[in-house]
Image: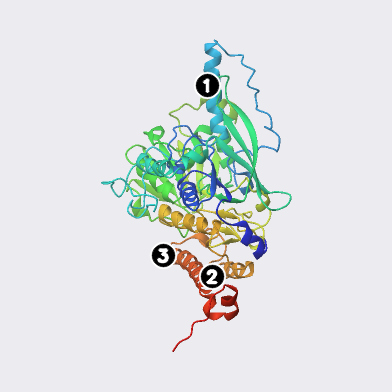
């Protein structure tokens, strides 16, 4: 996209699609609306709130292993697959049939989970950033809110912002975006979405296509579970599917009461599950790799036993080694018949449950042209956003604007930040840019800035981390400086135009004025 094309792409009244109605999407939509843009939000679930919306239902099992970023956390439909409502509304064969209606309700529930996988929010989730810091400029927390609150308070805060600022009014709920591509003439973005329509006759899926001038991706980090390709893990999952889960499927520690559990990971989710399992599980092991961002053992309860990284999962077959017979004999109270071999040689036995708190993969399955599952980070070139590792977003200016085409923007890419506050700053920057009030640097300048960051930080998840002291403040200051720099140039240009007569005698004559003389 040339500088001239960019200049004409932005301005008041442009149409904008926002993908996602979590805090990032709500902030983006609200600020875009304030700047006079025509906004449509696509949200695949039934409600705003994003990761903070609690749903006791859990997502379906991902593949084991799960390391292909373009796959996402849902099966993307093919163009035209739901061009006609499926099933057609006139096929009502369940009227008056109680059993059939109950089956229909169950079918609707299963379809809804399949269509829009629930978030990883668990019953005991709390914010780990104080509410006075984790706040949007769109509105304060209710008076008297404690620094750390349960998920329902956070969810209500996000939903209040969405309602107050007109975001809910422009949101298409139960609508999943399956593909975003440029139109044939390259002037707009074509969005192919699928809507889950609930009717008396049962749920149905319907495909819709619409065009937008601008797009904001606000789908968050916590969608596609990362399942490591650890030896024997796939076999354990196949044989004992209910005993091995990803932390996205965790809801409470109750299933682990009186049992031995192995939690793999050392991030926030792993630490929370360790904490919640304290006094519930018989014994809790936490397997860690010793990564840069591992939380220290001191944050976990004393009852948690920290062990090294898992090398492999081994089965322990009985008698004749008949797996089918062994599966039938495994009751709820029995541990998994196998051992976990760690990389330091230690062997864990009598494990009842395994929870993989192994993080998430960066994935935008609705942008397949910006994915490459074959090219590593170092070979992405200038077009790819997500490479084979799925641990960062490439080719974004200030972690927001797609350099090749800044009419595509992302909110919420940075890690280790005061989430709500930072995402709000990003949303304000996008809104002003899309409204034509902030001028972009040239593509060459954006490329130089991006290359400099790569040289300084390298590839991988750390590229987006603002964990370093002062990192977040520096980032926000950069956004503010960029916006005010543009405002300064706008004011300067207007001032020059306003007083052009004083510098250009010809202009003053054309305007019918007379040159002033001093005594």
Residue 93 placement, left or right of 498 = right
Report crowding for label 2: few under 14, some 14 to 19, many 20 or more residues within 10 A (C-alpha).
few
Mark 2 and mark 3: span between their CA atoms?
A: 18 Å
State the SS at label 1.
helix
Identify the mark nearer the N-term, 1 or 3.
Answer: 1
Contact, CB < 8 Å: mark 1 with mark 2? Answer: no
Q: Secondary structure at mark 2?
A: helix
2 and 3 marks in contact (CB < 8 Å): no
Lateral position of residue 125 relative to residue 341, left or right: left
The image shows residue 33 at horizontal and vertical percentages of 49, 49
Q: Looking at the image, which is closer to me, 362 or 411?
A: 411
Q: CA distance from mark 1 to mark 2?
A: 54 Å
Q: Which mark is residue 105?
A: 1
**Camera-nearest residue between 496 and 137:** 496
Camera-nearest residue between 320 and 72: 72
Dividing the picture into quadrants, the one containing residue 386 is bottom right
| Residue, far top | 96
Which residue matches tag 2?
456
Where is 118 relative to 85, above or below? below
Q: Looking at this view, is 218 or 416 the one in front?
A: 218
Q: Any mark on residue 473, and which?
A: 3
Q: How many marks?
A: 3
Residue 292 percent across, percent down from the top left: 46, 60
């Amino acid at each position: 996209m040339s500088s001239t094309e960019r200049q004409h792409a932005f301005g008041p009244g442009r149409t904008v699609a926002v993908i996602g109605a979590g805090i990032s999407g709500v902030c983006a939509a609200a600020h875009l609306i304030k700047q006079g843009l025509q906004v449509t939000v696509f949200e695949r679930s039934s409600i705003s709130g994003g990761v903070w919306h609690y749903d006791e239902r859990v997502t379906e099992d991902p593949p084991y292993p799960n390391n292909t970023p373009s796959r996402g956390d849902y099966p993307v439909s093919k163009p035209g697959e739901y061009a006609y409502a499926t099933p057609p509304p006139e096929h009502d064969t369940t009227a008056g049939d109680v059993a059939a209606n109950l089956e229909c309700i169950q079918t609707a529930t299963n379809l809804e989970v399949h269509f829009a996988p629930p978030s990883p929010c668990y019953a005991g989730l709390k914010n780990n950033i104080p509410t006075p810091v984790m706040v949007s400029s769109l509105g304060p927390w209710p008076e008297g809110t404690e620094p750390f609150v349960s998920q329902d308070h956070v969810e209500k805060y996000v939903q209040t912002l969405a309602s107050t600022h007109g975001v809910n009014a422009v949101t298409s709920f139960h609508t999943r975006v399956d593909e975003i591509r440029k139109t044939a003439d390259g002037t707009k973005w074509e969005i192919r979405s699928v809507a889950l329509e609930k009717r008396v006759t049962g749920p149905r899926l319907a495909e819709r296509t619409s065009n937008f001038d601008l797009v904001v991706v606000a789908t968050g980090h916590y969608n596609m579970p990362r399942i490591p390709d650890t030896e024997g893990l796939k076999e354990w999952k196949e044989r004992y599917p209910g005993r091995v889960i990803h932390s996205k499927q965790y809801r409470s520690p109750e299933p682990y009461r009186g049992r031995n559990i192995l939690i793999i990971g050392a991030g926030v989710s792993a630490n929370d599950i360790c904490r919640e399992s304290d006094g519930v599980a018989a014994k809790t092991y936490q397997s860690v790799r010793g990564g840069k961002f591992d939380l220290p053992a001191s944050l976990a309860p004393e009852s948690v036993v920290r062990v090294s990284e898992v090398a492999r999962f081994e089965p322990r077959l009985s008698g004749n080694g008949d797996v089918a017979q062994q599966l039938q004999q495994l009751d709820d109270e029995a541990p998994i018949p196998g051992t976990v071999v760690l990389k330091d040689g230690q062997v864990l036995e009598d494990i009842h449950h395994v929870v993989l708190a192994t993080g998430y993969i960066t994935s935008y399955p609705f942008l397949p042209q910006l994915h490459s599952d074959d090219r590593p980070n170092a070979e992405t070139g200038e077009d790819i956003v997500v490479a084979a590792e799925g641990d960062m977003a490439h080719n974004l200016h200030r972690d927001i604007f797609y350099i090749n085409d800044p009419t595509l923007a992302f909110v919420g890419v940075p890690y280790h930040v005061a989430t709500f506050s930072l995402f709000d700053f990003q949303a304000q920057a996008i809104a002003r840019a899309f409204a034509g009030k902030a001028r972009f640097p040239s593509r060459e300048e954006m490329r130089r800035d991006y290359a400099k960051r790569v040289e300084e930080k390298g590839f991988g998840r750390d590229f987006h981390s603002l964990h370093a002291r002062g990192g977040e403040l520096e980032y926000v200051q950069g956004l503010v400086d960029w916006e005010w720099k543009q405002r300064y140039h706008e004011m300067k240009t207007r001032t020059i135009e306003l007083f052009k007569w004083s510098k250009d005698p010809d202009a003053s004559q054309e305007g019918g004025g007379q040159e002033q003389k001093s005594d």
